[in-house]
Image (tube, rainbow, N blue to C red):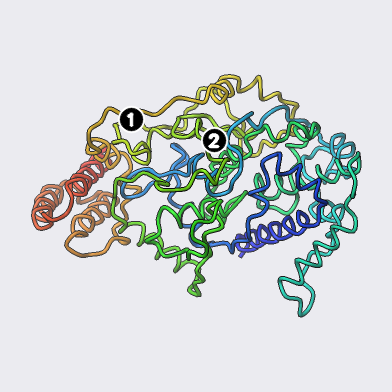
Amino acid sequence: MTGLKSELRSRLGWAVVRAIYDGLPDFQRARLEGMGFGPFLRLEELVPDVALIQALKERWDPECHAFLLPWGHMIPTLEDVVRITGLRVDGQAVTGVTYTSYQEHVERLLGLEVTRKRSSLVRRMALQASLGVANARHQTGEGQADYMDRLTEDARAVLAEEEGEAADRDLRRFLILVIGKLILGTIGDPVSCRCLPLLEDLSNVGSYAWGAALLAHLFDSLGTSSRETGVAGLFPLPQVWAYHHLPSLGRGEPRRAGAVPLLRRWRFRQDEQSLRRQVTMIHDALDSVPFVHWTPYVGEDDAAQPWVERGRPYFGRDIWLHSFNTVVPLHHRVVARTLGLHQSVVEFPTRQRPWERPGRSFRGIHQETDLTVRVREQLTDWEQRGKEVVSEATSDEDYFHAYARRYGAQVYKGSRRPFDPEGWIASLEGILHSTIRQRDDLPAVVDQLREELEKAQQMVGGTSSSRENLGSSVLEGQLAAGAA
């Protein structure tokens, strides 16, 4: 239940942010448009698909920063971010100095206080109250339209109507709510103000790659325990990413064909079953999705999306993503198939990194840290736009074999696979996986299972060679794991 409450807090933040945006005077909205936030701030609220997000999280591998699926790795990319949210993914990395205390910055630039002396958090209610929406709860009998109108009028009544210091303070308060609650938000209620030093010069705010920071933040959040329901940050990103790329799951419902950014095209299809039951069904569906060679966003009208054209130089590249002390790699080389390339066998990423990353408890408050120095190599990589992903492979077969040997025991769970002709191989894989876990009878059944696997492959001659080779490789990988 805690996770569900956290997701609902995100919904509240979305509605409040939109109401304040509508209450801003025209010149302030024009400034936000110039910063590149306009398309994002005009997005409509999306009901959280908690079961889908949880199922995806359980498929996340924090070593390679990718989802592990039966057909290989799959990840949200910078192109996904910019097309789904409209946020900028090109420009300066979102990084700088983290401080032991943000009190001075918060008092001077926002006129507020942090939650504690050594903290980077401001109270959400105090921040909303400073923008005129202290009473953000629905009133008895109040419909959604009336609720939003009331919040907008409350905000309009307190926001500065002319340019000047008061208007700049209003804009910084609003940006902290947008960035700290939605883009780089945490599951808890307070709002992070670590980005506040980047907002001091408002003329420079639009030069930062806020969309890239969002992706770094999402990758870091997906790496938390799968027992934590939901993710920090902008939950609609992985949700709409799955709706668009995995429509056979049946979780999303198209609502506005051709609308951009892509988040405007989808709504959540309500499901009344229990959360755990929904998660199980999503896993079952993921296990049965066939592999197809595809290139994303073919046929999209990019002329209507200038934010896409600006981000294009960063698409399809291995690159380090920055969100202050969160610095994570975008391993595009493990999903070269999504670029229309055949997948080469690559050295699969591990947790080992060429630099010492702060632990998850690090929030920039234990010591003053200049991250532009500490992660200079990764920052230079971003500034040089990473490394283009290329492939000389003529098929995906070798990749499938290597993937199955490395991840087969994690990806293939026999209880999730259908017992049908094509699923026979997978069912045998599940039996073998179970046997390996027991280990006692492994030597006696290995030869028998190999023979049964060969018979099963002969019976499903109509399936693709990729699927058969993948099943065989999974068996080999699990045999190796069991013998280790």
For the point 62% across and 49% down, the residue is 233
Lower position in the chain sequence, tag 1 or tag 2: 2
Q: Front-most of 255 and 77?
A: 255
Q: Quadrant of residue 129?
A: bottom right
Is 484 on the left-hand or right-hand side of 366? left
Q: Given contact means CB atoms under 8 Å apart, are the residues at marks 1 and 2 in contact?
A: no
Q: Which residue is mark 2?
A: 311
Q: Front-most of 242 and 267?
A: 267
For the point 39% across and 32% down, the residue is 333
User: What numbered label is drawn on residue 393?
Assistant: none
Q: Front-most of 149 and 220?
A: 149
Give residue 284's position: percent from left, percent from top: 35, 62
Q: Which residue is mark 1?
A: 346
Give residue 64's position: percent from left, percent from top: 43, 37
Element at label 2: helix
Q: Residues within 10 Å of mark 2 (few under 14, many from 20)?
A: many
Q: As displayed, is residue 136 above or below residue 401?
A: below
Give me the C-alpha separation between circle 1 and circle 2.
26 Å
Give residue 444's position: percent from left, percent from top: 14, 49
Is 134 on the left-hand or right-hand side of 441? right
Q: Name the residue furthest bottom.
A: 141
Element at label 1: loop
* Quadrant of the snapshot with the C terminus: top left
Is 434 on the left-hand or right-hand side of 91? left
Q: Residues within 10 Å of mark 1 (few under 14, many from 20)?
A: few
Mark 1: which amino acid?
Answer: Val
Viewer-nearest of discs 1 and 2:
2
For the point 28% across and 60% down, the residue is 417
Is 211 on the left-hand or right-hand side of 442? right
* Quadrant of the snapshot with the N terminus: bottom right
Mark 2: which amino acid?
Answer: Gly
Give residue 280's position: percent from left, percent from top: 41, 64
